[in-house]
Image (cartoon, rainbow, N blue to C red):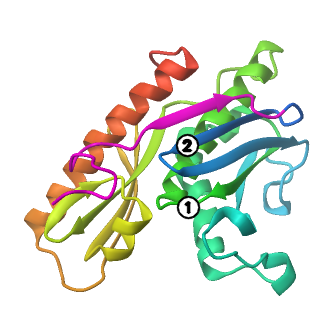
Amino acid sequence: MVRADKRKAGQLRDIKVELDYLDYPAGSCLISFGKTKVLCAVSVENRVPSFLLGQGRGWLTAEYSMLPASTKDRTQREARVGRLSGRTQEIRRLIGRSLRPIFDLSLVGERTFIIDCDVIQADGGTRTAAVNGAFLALYRAVEKMDVNKEFSAFPIIDFVAAVSVGIVNKETLLDLCYEEDSAADIDMNLVMTGRGKIIEVQATAEHFPIDRAGFDKMIDLGARGIERIIGLEKKILGKNKL
């Protein structure tokens, strides 16, 4: 099939990253996957949730939102509605779950790292772009704090990246844009580390169940995409390994 943006089945969208996009956060970046653009920023507070008080450990959490003009039809501000949608809550938890396994919270003291991910333009894959941008922003925040010797050891222990995979018209495609995502028979979001370990798999068969061979093919394609994203992260950060 011919993809909406003429890419090959296993080809990522063009990825662009601008580190330190904002002046005030501890770390930030603007990340783009094709037309999808997400602004990620890290704030650090010298406190932890009550369940961690006195344990000498830190915490990491995330927020996610879509700006009203990020979609073709204006998205209602959730603050106006007075509550977060189920989708928003699920994505903010996904971002936190994706980063905590590669962030040694025992090394950061009683601090909370809050990562705000704001979608300024959406064309599919906003949650996976948010995970990737959140990691880069977190790395920059930690890197700058480490210069001031605020940790006994560098707390980020591995790279992490996320990508979407889907089956559209019986073809397995990497990094879906909105048009492909909305037409997918099966879609998956995959999060993995730089060492090839799986952190999370979100997969749903929208129209028909998938067999094991098809599922494994999706995982393999996603893993290859993540390997390329992590290679780009290393290049952007100027780090070959952790």
x and y, in percent, of residue 60 in the image: 71, 49
Asked if the magenta segment contains residue 19, the reply would be yes
Task: Please name whichever residue, 91 or 166, is drawn nearer the observer in this view of the structure.
Answer: 166
Q: Which mark is residue 32?
A: 2
Q: Is residue 31 above or below residue 93?
A: above
Q: Nearer the viewer, residue 117 or 123?
A: 123
Query: Callout 1: helix, strand or loop?
Result: helix
Cβ–Cβ under 8 Å for marks 1 and 2: no
Counting from the top left corner in percent of width and height, residue 168 is at: 23, 69
- Quadrant where the N terminus sits is bottom left
**Can you tell which mark lies on residue 94?**
1
| Residue 113: x %, y % from top left | 77, 45
Amino acid at the residue labelled 2 = Ser
Say which residue appears at 28% left-offset and 64% top-offset: 166
Please determine whether, in this image, residue 180 is positioned above or below residue 241. below
Crowding around mark 1 (Cα neighbors within 10 Å: few <14, some 14 to 19, many 20+) is many
The mark lying in front, picked from 1 and 2, is 2
Residue beneath the point at 43% across and 65% down:
178
For the image, the number of numbered tags is 2
Query: 100 or 226, which is in the foreground?
Result: 226
Percent position (x, y) of residue 84? 74, 79
Looking at the magenta stretch, what is its main secondary structure?
loop
Residue type (three-letter) at the residue carrying disc 1:
Leu
For the record, the magenta segment spans 1-22
